Image: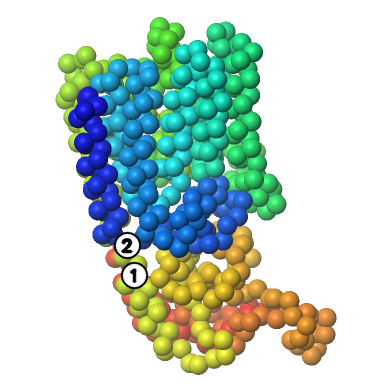
């Protein structure tokens, strides 16, 4: 596809994505990043801090931040075209961009605030500079390192692409000049500096946010989680695309010695796809790693099959299925409406008996707390909606102020414990709890808990609103 046809198509898609954002409510994942942007840190349980800082750059105008993501989708498509055009011709570059815009995960990332889109833009920009350096202009290694460093600020998996490029360059005799060594060291330094704040943050929490088991369990294959992870990958890319990836990787490895461009393509995406396979076998989320390696592999595959008589029918089938999968993904996301649930929770607060300090809200998990917190008012430094207190540190809410926390005070809270210098400002207050069932951490922490009413939640589920009276902390 020529650029003169591609640009109007991209503008049309961007306009449709903007319209989608303007006509749909905030998603739970977006609400989470909005909350993180008001509680900035060096790292978060779900990854580096780049997304929170980017959202914070828009101040209190979260709708403007949401509209920035379709623009990022447009920029990402343009950078993808520049990258592929430096390796192949204009036709392959155009069809590679069309293919990218058919992927369900790309379309979702272009309309929902999250780390994938800014990370992908930065990865592809880094690949553009890396290709320039690979072709002989050594100064471009520094530019590649800067963009890869930015990408790592959004997703840890982004480091897989520069890791593959550095390995590929070091194994090639042609790229062992002093200028190349300096450039590759610049890439490593940029990525390391970008990772450092998040690593120090994780180290301060004893690596709990990123710990996934022991060294022994790291090599175990988990059949049932693997099937779930494979299903998630198929939903993100569509089944025909996943099958095409398997065939394309096999063909790429076989052609490395015969085609010089294949060496660069394998260096660009090989490590990312190898990591995706490892995470897949472990039952984890391999979507981000796969997305970072998708554009180079797609460009190679399209350039290899475009003269085949089967290219048009097979390409049309893959494109049609991917387009349907994208439409289904956006349709499911568009049906989710938490605003009505939040309105019912807010209305239920009128049933709370009057108590000093007023009532507060608790949701059963972090996703519910984030989306309800976007619509409900907060109280000082506390999140607008809490999650039930727990001894386990399993999400970002565990690091934010909680209704179970004691704060320093000179007032003696208990005459029998004169050493106690802290008080809990929530003791004696009432709360609204929203969940499927009632956990023991709620039953034991309040003097009385009463079901109030059921509400219909997104996905056809029923949630119950509970009146929780007289908070007294959990007994020891």
Question: Which residue is found at the position 57% from the left and 53% from the top?
Answer: 44
How many residues crowd around disc 2 within 10 Å: few (fewer than 14), some, or many (20 or more)? Answer: some
The front one of 430 and 460 is 430
Q: Is residue 469 above or below residue 298?
A: below
Q: Report x, y in % for residue 222.
A: 49, 41
How many numbered marks does the figure carry?
2
Q: Quadrant of residue 214?
A: top right
Which residue is label 2 attached to?
A: 25
**Image position, residue 444 (x, y; %):** 58, 80
Q: Helix or strand or loop: what does disc 2 sit on?
A: loop
In which quadrant is the N terminus drawn? top left
Q: Residue furthest right?
A: 419
The answer to whether 428 is drawn above or below residue 391 in the figure is: below
Q: What percent of the width, then of the height, locates residue 369?
A: 47, 67
**What separation in Å lies between label 1 and label 2 (alpha carbons)?**
8 Å
Q: Position of residue 351 (x, y in %)?
A: 42, 89
The residue depicted at 54 percent of the width and 23 percent of the height is 141
Residue shown at the point (44%, 42%) measured from the top left:
118
Out of 54 and 415, give the one closest to the viewer. 54
Name the side, left or right, on which 468 lies relative to 117: right
The reply to whether dot 1 and dot 2 touch (C-beta < 8 Å) is yes
Give the crowd class for mark 1: few <14, some 14-19, many >=20 residues within 10 Å. some
Q: Is residue 183 above or below residue 16?
A: above
Identify the disc placed on residue 114. Answer: none
Q: Residue furthest bottom?
A: 354
Q: Quadrant of residue 171?
A: top right
Task: Name the secondary structure under disc 1.
Answer: helix
Image quarter where the C terminus lies is: bottom right
| 421, 208: nearer the viewer | 421
| 266 is higher (above) or lower (below) than 398 | above
What residue is shown with label 1?
339
Identify the residue at image location x=64%, y=45%: 197
């Amino acid at each position: 596809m020529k650029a003169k046809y591609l640009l109007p198509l991209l503008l049309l898609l961007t306009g449709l994505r903007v319209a989608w954002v303007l006509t749909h409510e905030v998603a739970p994942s977006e609400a989470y990043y909005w909350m993180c942007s008001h509680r900035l840190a060096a790292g978060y349980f779900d990854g580096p801090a780049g997304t929170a800082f980017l959202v914070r750059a828009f101040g209190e105008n979260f709708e403007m931040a949401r509209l920035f993501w379709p623009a990022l989708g447009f920029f990402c498509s343009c950078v993808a075209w520049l990258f592929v055009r430096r390796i192949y011709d204009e036709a392959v570059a155009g069809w590679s961009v069309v293919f990218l815009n058919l992927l369900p995960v790309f379309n979702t990332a272009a309309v929902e605030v999250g780390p994938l889109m800014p990370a992908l833009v930065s990865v592809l920009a880094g690949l553009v500079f890396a290709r320039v350096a690979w072709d002989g202009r050594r100064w471009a290694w520094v530019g590649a390192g800067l963009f890869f460093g930015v990408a790592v600020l959004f997703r840890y998996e982004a480091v897989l692409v520069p890791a593959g490029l550095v390995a590929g360059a070091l194994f090639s005799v042609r790229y062992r000049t002093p200028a190349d060594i300096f450039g590759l060291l610049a890439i490593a330094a940029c990525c390391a500096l970008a990772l450092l704040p998040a690593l120090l943050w994780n180290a301060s929490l004893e690596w709990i946010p990123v710990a996934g088991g022991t060294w022994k369990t790291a090599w175990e294959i988990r059949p049932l989680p693997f099937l779930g992870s494979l299903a998630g990958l198929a939903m993100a890319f569509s089944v025909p695309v996943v099958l095409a990836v398997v065939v394309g990787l096999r063909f790429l490895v076989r052609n490395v010695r015969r085609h010089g461009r294949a060496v660069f393509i394998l260096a660009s995406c090989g490590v990312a796809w190898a990591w995706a396979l490892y995470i897949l076998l472990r039952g984890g989320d391999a979507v981000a790693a796969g997305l970072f390696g998708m554009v180079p592999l797609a460009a190679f595959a399209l350039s290899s099959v475009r003269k085949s008589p089967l290219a048009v029918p097979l390409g049309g089938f893959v494109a049609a299925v991917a387009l349907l999968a994208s439409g289904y993904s956006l349709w499911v996301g568009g049906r989710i409406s938490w605003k009505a649930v939040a309105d019912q929770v807010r209305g239920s607060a009128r049933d709370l008996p009057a108590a000093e300090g007023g009532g507060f809200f608790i949701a059963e998990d972090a996703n519910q707390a984030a989306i309800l917190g976007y619509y409900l008012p907060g109280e000082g430094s506390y999140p607008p909606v809490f999650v039930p207190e727990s001894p386990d540190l399993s999400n970002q809410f565990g690091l934010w102020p909680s209704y179970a926390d004691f704060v320093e005070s000179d007032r003696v809270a208990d005459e029998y414990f004169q050493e106690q210098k802290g008080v809990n400002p929530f003791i004696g207050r009432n709360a609204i709890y929203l969940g499927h069932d009632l956990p023991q951490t709620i039953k034991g922490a309040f003097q009385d808990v009463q079901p109030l009413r059921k509400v219909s939640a997104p996905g056809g589920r029923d949630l119950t609103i509970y009146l929780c009276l007289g908070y007294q902390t959990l007994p020891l």
